[in-house]
């Protein structure tokens, strides 16, 4: 769990960044794990929300049942139901009718779709293309992952919450444009997505799944050949010591013994259908 002095001002983990896929999110997580970026350790107060929840801001936080930690993310804004655009969940801000509306000019409305951002794939682009009503206000983007950074460590659940507007998105830098993050290499096996895709990609919620088991050495495979519930004996266990003929009876039983060995080898080598 992340800890920090209670009087510290909570600021975004990154002030201006657009995350496009799971790899981008894991790069941000790795920046936090290495101490390059700072996570959020408590709920934002009213002043911090008003100042820092804006287009481009990204917050990383660890889920915790501890009273000093964060159980869920709150920002005191009204949002639509969630929409899954793998690997992220998206929420569109609900804009009241008395608030000024964004311009409806086509060049502004479709700036993100027809602009330079078309040169790369982004979950945000998928959300825009698949939305019946294109978001005009702030959009919230959420991702979570289980983190296991050592063999016997218990899994920890980290979350990434990002904000952006589609009018601003083409000008928000990506991970490969950030001088610090583009130099970070994410180790394999540390981050595992905490959300599973539902049958309906537009489902309003997504299962967080069970935490993965800590990394433990894999037990050695059995020396016996198994096919479903059928276990074929090995050659040595199939021939009991009593069946091995004494020297005086070797000639009498040698032909039968050789045939038995061939049959057992054949059974051990053939798959059971």
Image (tube, rainbow, N blue to C red):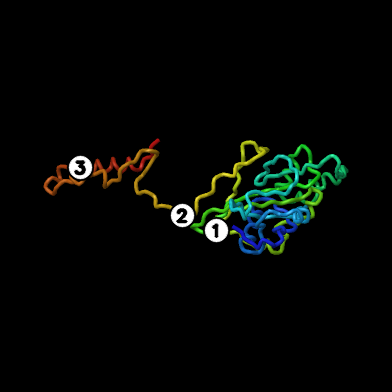
**Image vertical order of residue 257 relative to residue 28, above or below:** above
Q: Residues within 10 Å of mark 3 (few under 14, many from 20)?
A: few
Number of the front mark, 2 or 3? 2
SS state under label 1: loop
Query: Tag 2 or tag 1, which sits nearer the N-term?
Result: 1
Give the label on residue 149, or none.
1
Give the number of the disc on residue 216: 2
Check contact, mark 2 vs mark 3: CB within 8 A: no
Q: Are marks 3 and 1 in contact (CB under 8 Å)?
A: no
Left or right: 135, with 86 as reference point:
right
Q: Residues within 10 Å of mark 2 (few under 14, many from 20)?
A: few
Q: Earlier in the sequence, mark 3 or mark 1?
A: 1
Q: Nearer the viewer, residue 73 or 5?
A: 5
Q: Is residue 56 visible?
A: no
- Other-residue count near label 1 (Cα within 10 Å), few / some / many at <14 / 14–19 / ≥20: some
Q: Which residue is painted at 85% across and 46% down in the image?
A: 108
Give the secondary structure at mark 3. helix
C-alpha separation, residue under disc 1 versus residue under disc 2: 12 Å
Looking at the image, residue 66 sits to the left or right of residue 239; the answer is right
Q: Mark 2 or 3 closer to N-term?
A: 2
Give me the C-alpha separation between circle 3 and circle 1.
61 Å
In this rendering, the answer to whether 174 lies above or below 79 is below
Q: CA distance from mark 2 to mark 3?
A: 49 Å
Residue 153 showing in the rendered view: yes
The kind of secondary structure element at disc 2 is loop
- Compare residues 196 and 7 and report the one nearer the observer: 7
Q: Which residue is mark 3?
A: 255
In the picture, the quarter occupied by the C terminus is top left
Asked whether the beta carbons under mark 1 and mark 2 sit within 8 Å of each other, the answer is no
């Amino acid at each position: 769990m992340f800890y920090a002095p209670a009087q510290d001002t909570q600021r975004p983990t990154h002030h201006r960044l657009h995350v496009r896929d799971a790899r981008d999110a894991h790069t941000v997580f790795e920046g936090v794990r290495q101490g390059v970026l700072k996570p959020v350790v408590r709920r934002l107060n009213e002043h911090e929300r008003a100042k820092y929840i804006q287009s481009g801001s990204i917050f990383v936080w660890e889920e915790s049942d501890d009273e000093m930690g964060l159980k869920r993310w709150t920002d005191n804004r009204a949002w639509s139901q969630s929409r899954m655009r793998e690997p992220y969940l998206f929420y569109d801000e609900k804009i009241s009718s008395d608030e000024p509306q964004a311009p409806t000019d086509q060049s502004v409305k479709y700036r993100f779709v027809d602009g330079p951002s078309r040169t790369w794939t982004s979950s945000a682009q998928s959300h825009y293309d698949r939305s019946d009503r294109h978001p005009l206000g702030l959009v919230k983007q959420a991702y979570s992952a289980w983190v296991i950074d050592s063999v016997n460590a218990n899994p920890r659940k980290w979350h990434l919450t990002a904000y952006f507007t589609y009018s601003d998105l083409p000008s928000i830098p990506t991970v490969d444009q950030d001088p610090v993050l583009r130099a970070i290499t994410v180790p394999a096996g540390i981050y595992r997505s905490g959300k599973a895709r539902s049958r309906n990609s537009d489902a309003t919620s997504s299962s967080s799944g069970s935490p993965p088991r800590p990394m433990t050495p894999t037990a050695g495979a059995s020396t016996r050949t198994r096919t479903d519930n059928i276990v074929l004996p090995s050659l040595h266990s199939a021939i009991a010591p009593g069946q091995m003929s004494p020297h005086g009876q070797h000639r009498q039983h040698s032909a039968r013994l050789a045939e038995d060995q061939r049959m057992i080898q054949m059974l051990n080598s053939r798959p059971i259908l």
